[in-house]
């Protein structure tokens, strides 16, 4: 497969996953705000903090009024990580490698793009309840996954997209979990109160994990939620699971059947995976959840850079022409 | 749908004959049109537009900042060509392609036609499209123009006239293919009833033609595109997808030891045949335009060494020049010893003094074209232009006569078209596609371009033209 094409497929996977997660972020916060007691103000600040774009936001806007935040996360063309931007990027990547995609994947991705354009025209962020729109977007992305799942041959291209998707998802699950860190409780005494529970529940629901969690753990408990979303071996949105699957993708790409590693990307990924495999939730909380997640995000970025240098960098036949895309 | 108001006007109409009768080959379609409500027709048109948008059937317009991607409007009323008419077209196009190919081989090698004084030497040898690096070259299997998309129009007399021979990798074939798929959904039952020849095997034929250019048992084929900002990018990726070959940019390729390689995730892989959609002089900055960032340094050397086949061969542009066009009937005669089957439009060469004077005196009645422009740019339609424009073109012609030709204004035929005011006639041209592989083959279909503005003769997509599906009947 052409290096340039592999690069685009990988980023197609990342951008789609990123937009899907943003739709989830927005939905969960919206639900959460509805459950807050009347004397607590709506909190949209934590959401932006979790995406890592707080600086950009503050350079553009004052205050954290709902509509403003929704615009920033959903439709702001100046925010490179807004859904509008990432979906546009996903489509651009799809467009340059269209000959490698099946017709339906391309068409649904293209429709997704127009869906966002329409949302922009209709100023969806100002609607009383914008959730149906974000739900529609999320479903369209899930449809694209579904089409791929049942139609795409499991060859190199498939694994590059999966690789992008899992790395992005690992990053985003860590950020969703981090939202909790940024949400302010009225006082320390509130830890373990119904309000605290509400937050954890909303968080689980945002990654469609609530029911699975319930079955496994029963009661809502912060350590258990962390264990579930970071270390669970079977839940497809847990960070460990994403890293494990991403590693498998790398092995499939290089044809590594014997385990260990065959290139620097596999080495870094294998190291990260094994550390997580043997980690205990107590250690994570002892280390500080926010710090742990921060560190994890850096490691994931590191792996992504190694994927780039191992597979996507091409020798220049004219002058230097690098194609770099925004990490997150 | 109301059809009573439809009339042919003063032009040749493809559906109505001069006495207002429905031509036989349109009969079934006309019946269908009559019993379909205009509401229904508009709905069908709307859903065709939606499908195009979903498919991303877009092209980019140069010099237009508003919305890079545009959709080429597809009018749902087809242009229908009866088989008898098609047979003549087919024979004429084969003849023309064969002659032009022999001409190219000759002017880059023995130059017999120039020595015999049939075509003036300086017209060829001084043309900027006559590529010196190609002198003495014979491309694989002696084929220069593998893919041709000839433009024709039908005039008042009901005869087809050749307007242009497009030998430089013409675009539009993806519209012919995709439009057919859309239109099949619009008229599910008529296709069978009428017997419309299929076009869908074009990609298979194209692939076979490209593979034929290499002697390897399983040659690796690719489509070379200038990239996503090219106006025909959609088509490049569409054709690569349909043929199941790689779509490559210049930056994907690298030349080593006069061999061309693709840069893949598993290292370098040799490529044998390129259907290149990059202009000749941008192919290789080492041989041609050193500024080109689109091409591949060293590509031409690899081509000369016979390690990569290029379709079309570099150098074909000199033969579809609008001044050379005037000589094509003589070219056919010279190489094949046959009379041309298809007519040329009478052409005045401004490089010849007498003809130039005629052009300057009659500029109001003529169409003046740059010998070297495409896409409807750099041309004057005398009867539709203002006095200032006439004056401007007189100056242009006098200052640089070799750069211009003129032709009488042709009356383009009309085809019923769905417009805001119901069904109304709009002018069309015709671009069939010809493949030159083991033999010459004309694909039984075409891109019909339609000038959507009432009375307009400019059918170019970049200037408000649309398209129609073209049915060639069995």
Image (cartoon, rainbow, N blue to C red):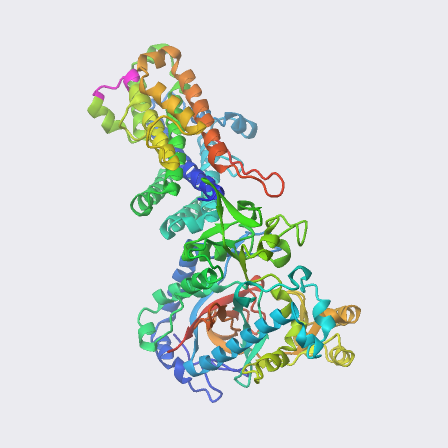
Q: Position of residue A105 (x, y in %)?
A: 37, 48
Residue at the spot 37% in from the left edge and 74% down from the top edge: B196
Q: How many marks?
A: 0
- Quarter of the figure with residue B381: bottom right
Q: Position of residue B116 (x, y in %)?
A: 70, 79
Query: In this orientation, which residue lies closer to the viewer: A148 or A78?
Result: A148
Location of residue B28 with respect to B41 vertically, above or below: below
Location of residue B452 with respect to A324 vertically, above or below: below
- Quarter of the figure with residue B35: bottom left
Task: Report the magenta residues as a range.
Answer: A217-224
Q: Position of residue B92 (x, y in %)?
A: 52, 79
- Is residue B417 among the parts visible in the rendering? yes
Q: Quadrant of the C terminus of chain B?
A: bottom left
Q: Quadrant of the N terminus of chain B?
A: bottom left
Going by the picture, which residue comes out furthest to the bottom? B19
Residue at the spot 37% in from the left edge and 21% down from the top edge: A180
In the image, A59: left or right of A255?
right
Residue at the spot 35% in from the left edge and 26% down from the top edge: A239
């Amino acid at each position: 497969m052409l290096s340039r094409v592999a690069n685009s497929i990988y980023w197609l996977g990342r951008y789609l996953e990123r937009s899907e997660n943003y739709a989830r972020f927005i939905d969960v916060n919206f639900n959460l705000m509805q459950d807050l007691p009347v004397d607590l103000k709506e909190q949209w600040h934590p959401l932006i903090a979790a995406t890592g774009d707080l600086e950009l936001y503050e350079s553009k806007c004052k205050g954290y009024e709902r509509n403003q935040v929704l615009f920033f996360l959903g439709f702001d063309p100046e925010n490179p990580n807004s859904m509008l931007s990432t979906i546009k990027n996903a489509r651009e990547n799809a467009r340059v490698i269209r000959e490698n995609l099946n017709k339906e994947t391309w068409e649904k991705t293209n429709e997704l793009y127009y869906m966002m354009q329409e949302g922009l025209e209709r100023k969806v962020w100002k609607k009383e309840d914008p959730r149906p729109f974000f739900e529609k977007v999320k479903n369209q992305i899930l449809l694209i996954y579904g089409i791929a799942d049942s139609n795409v041959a499991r060859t190199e291209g498939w694994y590059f997209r999966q690789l992008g998707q899992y790395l992005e998802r690992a990053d985003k699950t860590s950020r969703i979990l981090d939202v909790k860190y940024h949400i302010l409780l009225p006082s320390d005494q509130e830890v373990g109160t119904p309000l605290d529970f509400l937050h954890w529940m909303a968080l689980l629901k945002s990654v469609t994990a609530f029911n699975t969690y319930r079955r496994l753990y029963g009661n809502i408990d912060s350590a258990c939620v962390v264990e579930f979303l970071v270390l669970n071996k079977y839940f497809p949105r847990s960070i460990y699971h994403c890293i494990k699957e991403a590693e498998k993708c790398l092995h499939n790409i290089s044809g590594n059947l014997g385990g260990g590693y065959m290139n620097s990307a596999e080495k870094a990924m294998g190291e990260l995976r094994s550390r997580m495999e043997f980690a205990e939730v107590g250690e994570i909380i002892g280390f500080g959840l926010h710090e742990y997640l921060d560190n994890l995000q850096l490691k994931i970025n590191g792996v992504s850079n190694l994927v780039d240098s191992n597979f996507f960098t091409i020798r220049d036949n004219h002058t230097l022409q690098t194609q770099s895309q925004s990490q997150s | 749908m109301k059809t009573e108001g439809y009339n042919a006007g003063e032009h040749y109409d493809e559906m109505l004959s001069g006495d207002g009768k429905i031509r036989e080959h349109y009969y079934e379609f006309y019946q269908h049109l009559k019993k379909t409500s205009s509401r229904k027709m508009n709905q069908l048109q709307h859903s065709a537009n939606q499908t195009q948008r979903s498919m991303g059937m877009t092209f980019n317009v140069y010099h237009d900042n508003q919305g890079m991607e545009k959709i080429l409007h597809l009018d749902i009323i087809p242009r229908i060509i009866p088989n008898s008419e098609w047979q003549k077209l087919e024979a004429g196009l084969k003849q023309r392609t064969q002659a032009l190919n022999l001409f190219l081989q000759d002017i880059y090698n023995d130059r017999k036609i120039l020595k015999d004084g049939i075509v003036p030497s300086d017209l060829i040898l001084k043309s900027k499209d006559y590529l010196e690096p190609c002198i003495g070259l014979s491309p694989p299997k002696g084929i220069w123009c593998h893919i041709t998309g000839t433009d024709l129009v039908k005039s008042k007399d009901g005869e087809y006239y050749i307007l242009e021979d497009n030998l430089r990798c013409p675009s539009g074939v993806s519209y012919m293919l995709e439009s057919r798929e859309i239109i099949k959904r619009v008229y599910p039952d008529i296709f069978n009833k009428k017997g419309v020849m299929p076009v869908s095997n074009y990609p298979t034929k194209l692939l076979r033609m490209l593979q034929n250019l290499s002697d390897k048992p399983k040659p690796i084929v690719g489509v070379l595109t200038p990239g996503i900002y090219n106006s025909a990018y959609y088509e490049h990726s569409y054709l690569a997808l349909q043929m199941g070959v790689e779509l490559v940019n210049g930056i994907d390729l690298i030349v080593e030891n006069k061999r061309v390689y693709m840069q893949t995730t598993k290292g370098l892989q040799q490529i044998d045949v390129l259907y290149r959609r990059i202009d000749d002089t941008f192919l290789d900055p080492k041989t041609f335009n050193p500024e080109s960032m689109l091409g591949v340094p060293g590509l031409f050397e690899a081509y000369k060494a016979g390690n990569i086949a290029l379709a079309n061969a570099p150098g074909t542009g000199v033969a579809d020049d609008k001044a050379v066009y005037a000589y094509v009937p003589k070219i056919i005669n010279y190489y094949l010893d046959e009379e041309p089957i298809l007519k040329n439009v009478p052409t005045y060469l401004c490089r010849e003094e007498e003809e130039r004077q005629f052009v300057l005196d009659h500029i109001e009645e003529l169409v003046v074209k740059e010998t070297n422009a495409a896409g409807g740019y750099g041309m004057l339609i005398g009867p539709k232009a203002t006095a200032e424009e006439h004056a401007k073109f007189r100056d242009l012609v006098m200052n640089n006569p070799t750069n211009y030709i003129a032709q009488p204004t042709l009356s383009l035929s009309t085809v019923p078209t769905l417009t805001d005011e119901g069904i109304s006639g709009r002018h069309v041209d015709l671009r069939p596609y010809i493949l030159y592989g083991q033999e010459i083959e004309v694909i039984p279909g075409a891109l019909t371009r339609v000038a959507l503005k009432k009375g307009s003769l400019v059918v170019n997509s970049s200037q408000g033209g649309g398209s129609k599906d073209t049915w060639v009947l069995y």
